[in-house]
Image: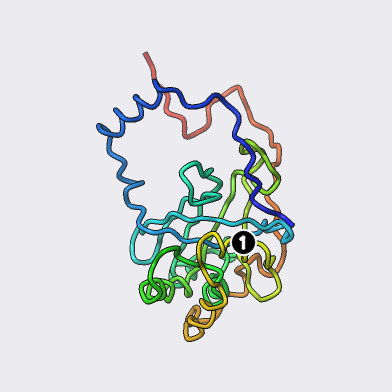
Amino acid sequence: MSKNSKSKVPGEPTGSGTSLLETATAAIQAFAPVNKIHQHLCAFHFYSHDMTRQVEAHHLCGHQNEEMRQCLIYDSPEANARLIGLEYIVSENLFMTLPDEEKRLWHSHEYEVKSGLLVMPGIPGPVERRDLESVCKTYGKVYHFWQVDKGDSLPLGVPQLMMAFTRDGQVYNELVQNCGKRLGVDHEKERMNREYMKGPEHGIDPLANGGGKGLKTVLREVHLPNNQPPPSATRVFV
């Protein structure tokens, strides 16, 4: 079973000089994009080409507007968590404007929400359900940069497209149970409390979730002319 292997990140421990510098810059600089983060969502992803590789994903999200939010994804909620990916979440309305080929890269959230797999740790049930009623109707696009399930100590390889689960029997029970114990969440109870929720108004688009097929992210080498700048390059004459 694939798990978030907590391998040690190589490198020297953070020194006192760096810590002092961080304290100084934190007091002076603004971090407006990061300060927009307002919620923590925990869910599970699998590699879009291999459902046997499943990972716990902690999303720290902020709204761009009422129909889009963007999330940084970490492998845990701890202070030393590794940034392993990102997710964009859009409304059904925005999803329907996407080209058909693009829609295959996005996954639906209805099952994640209604099954109780997607939770907001520490948030009272009524408050959590109010937001998840909206999330249930959305679509997400996820890429992971750090393959922690392989035990990689650094982010290696090509960013990988990830997907979310869409029916019972797909996610590993042990993965869910271990997460629930650590976060103090009863996923089955959450499932029962969310039975009333509804997914996208027009149903889940058949092109979403890879169109029902696996999608693999690969790197392809192409010819790159090196005797002239690209057309968009700005030329400066002196």
* Occupied quadrant, residue 222: top right
Residue 56: give x, y in percent of width and height. Answer: 59, 57
Quick one: quadrant of the C terminus? top left
Q: Vertically, is 27 above or below 132? A: above
* Residue 42 horizontal side relative to residue 165, left or right: left
Frontmost residue, 185 versus 115: 185
Residue at the (74%, 57%) spot, across then down: 1
Residue at the (64%, 36%) spot, across then down: 153
* Residue 19 horizontal side relative to residue 58, left or right: left
* Residue 29 horizontal side relative to residue 196, left or right: left
Residue 26: give x, y in percent of width and height. Answer: 30, 34
Frontmost residue, 156 versus 68: 156
Frontmost residue, 31 versus 231: 31
Q: Vertically, is 166 above or below 163? A: below
* Helix, strand or loop for disc 1: helix
Q: Residue furthest bottom?
A: 196
Residue 179: give x, y in percent of width and height. Answer: 58, 61
Q: Amino acid at mark 1?
A: Asn
* Occupied quadrant, residue 177: bottom right
Frontmost residue, 140 versus 118: 118
Q: Residue furthest top?
A: 238
Give the residue pinned by disc 1: 178
Residue at the (42%, 24%) spot, across then down: 235
